[in-house]
Image (spheres, grey):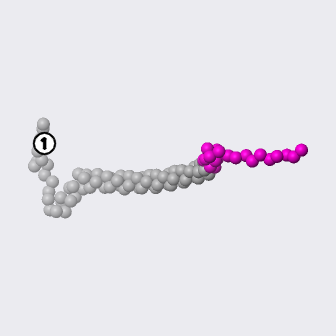
């Protein structure tokens, strides 16, 4: 008795399916790593932007305090005195609605 070996042939559809599965097994991990890298880069940019915003808010707060300080009545009177002006309360008129 001789054993006969039958040659198993794959159909074109089977070959296509195997190639597709192999490509999917290769593409999925690569796309996962790529997606995580993009997400990490985006998070870094977000943190940098938050830092810039906090810095700018500090600057804005400091400038607001300076405006309040310069707009105070004492400072206005000091500047007026330096310019040779006098504060005369009798010349101030209130306008009512």
- Horizontal side of 40 relative to 87 (left or right) equals right
Crowding at dot 1, Cα within 10 Å, few <14 / some 14-19 / many 20+, comes out as few
In the picture as drawn, the residue positioned furthest to the top comes out as: 97
Task: Return the x and y of residue 16 as percentages of the image width and height.
Answer: 61, 47
Residue receiving disc 1: 94
- Between 43 and 26, the residue placed more toward the observer is 26
Residue drawn at (65%, 45%) of the image: 11
- Horizontal side of 79 relative to 63 (left or right) equals left
**Which secondary structure lies at badge 1?**
loop
Q: Which residues are magenta?
A: 1-22
- Between 10 and 89, the residue placed more toward the observer is 10
In the picture as drawn, the residue positioned furthest to the front comes out as: 1
**Quarter of the C terminus within the rendering:** top left
Task: Return the x and y of residue 68 as percentages of the image width and height.
Answer: 29, 51
Q: Is residue 57 visible?
A: yes
Residue drawn at (82%, 46%) of the image: 4
- Horizontal side of 31 relative to 58 (left or right) equals right
- Horizontal side of 88 relative to 66 (left or right) equals left
Q: Is residue 25 visible?
A: no
Q: In this rendering, is residue 94 above or below 68? A: above
- Between 49 and 5, the residue placed more toward the observer is 5
Task: Return the x and y of residue 19 as percentages of the image width and height.
Answer: 62, 49
């Amino acid at each position: 008795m001789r054993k006969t070996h039958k040659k198993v042939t794959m159909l074109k559809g089977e070959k296509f399916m195997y190639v597709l599965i192999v490509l999917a097994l290769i593409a999925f991990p690569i796309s996962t790593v790529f997606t995580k890298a993009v997400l990490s880069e985006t998070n870094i940019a977000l943190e940098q932007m938050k830092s810039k915003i906090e810095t700018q808010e500090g600057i804005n707060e400091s400038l607001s305090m300076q405006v309040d300080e310069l707009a105070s009545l004492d400072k206005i009177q000091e500047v007026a005195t330096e310019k040779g002006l006098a504060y005369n309360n009798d010349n101030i008129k209130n306008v009512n609605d």
